[in-house]
Image: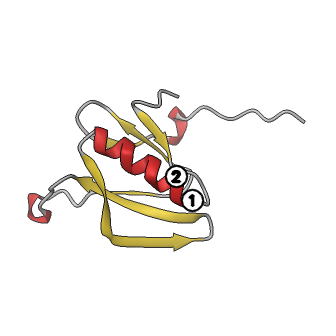
Amino acid sequence: MDSENAYEWPRGATQSDMHRLETWLARHGWEVDPTVYMAGAGGAAVQVRRIDAVWADGESGLLILPAEIVMWDGTRIRIAPRAAVPARCTAS
């Protein structure tokens, strides 16, 4: 996975995961929306938006759920389709 153009938001994310996400988003002109927080069994979901976004612009942002991969396509951030995410192999 290209870490410059993709970021995996892990299950059970820690504060250091949040810092890495915030740094990655800032490089692309996005930020974590501090007004939205959701916690679930798999960990925290994160709402992100363009830096300095005005809600009236019609773009409410993007909700990133645990274990989702976020992709930067050069213009916007989106969630990678499940089919585009390679399966992980685990050795037994």
Q: Residue furthest top?
A: 2
Mark 2 and mark 1: Cα distance apart in space: 5 Å
Instruction: Specify whether 55 is left or right of 43.
Output: left
Q: Residue at x 51, y 65 (%)?
A: 44
Q: Residue at x 57, y 59 (%)?
A: 14
Tell me the amino acid under the disc marked 2: Asp
Q: Quadrant of the C terminus?
A: top right
Q: To which quarter of the image does residue 61 belong?
A: bottom left
Instruction: Between residue 2 and residue 68, name the one nearer to us.
Output: 2
Q: Does 53 appear above or below 72?
A: below
**Numbered mark located on residue 17 in the image:** 2
Name the residue carrying label 1: 14
> Residue 83, position in %: x, y?
53, 36
Q: Determine whether the residue tagged by mark 2 lies in a helix, strand or loop.
A: helix
Q: Residue at x 9, y 64 (%)?
A: 56
Tell me the crowding category of disc 2: few under 14, some 14 to 19, or many 20 or more residues within 10 angstroms, Cα based. some
> Residue 89, position in %: x, y?
75, 32
Tell me the crowding category of disc 1: few under 14, some 14 to 19, or many 20 or more residues within 10 angstroms, Cα based. few
Q: To which quarter of the image does residue 37 belong?
A: bottom left
Q: Residue furthest right?
A: 92
Instruction: Specify whether 35 is left or right of 55.
Output: right
Q: Determine whether the residue tagged by mark 1 lies in a helix, strand or loop.
A: loop
Tell me the amino acid under the disc marked 1: Thr
Count of numbered marks? 2
> Residue 33, position in %: x, y?
30, 63
CB of mark 2 within 8 Å of CB of mark 1?
A: yes
Q: Residue at x 60, y 56 (%)?
A: 11
Instruction: Between residue 64 and residue 32, name the one nearer to us.
Output: 32
**Numbered mark located on residue 57 in the image:** none
Instruction: Between residue 78 and residue 81, name the one nearer to us.
Output: 78
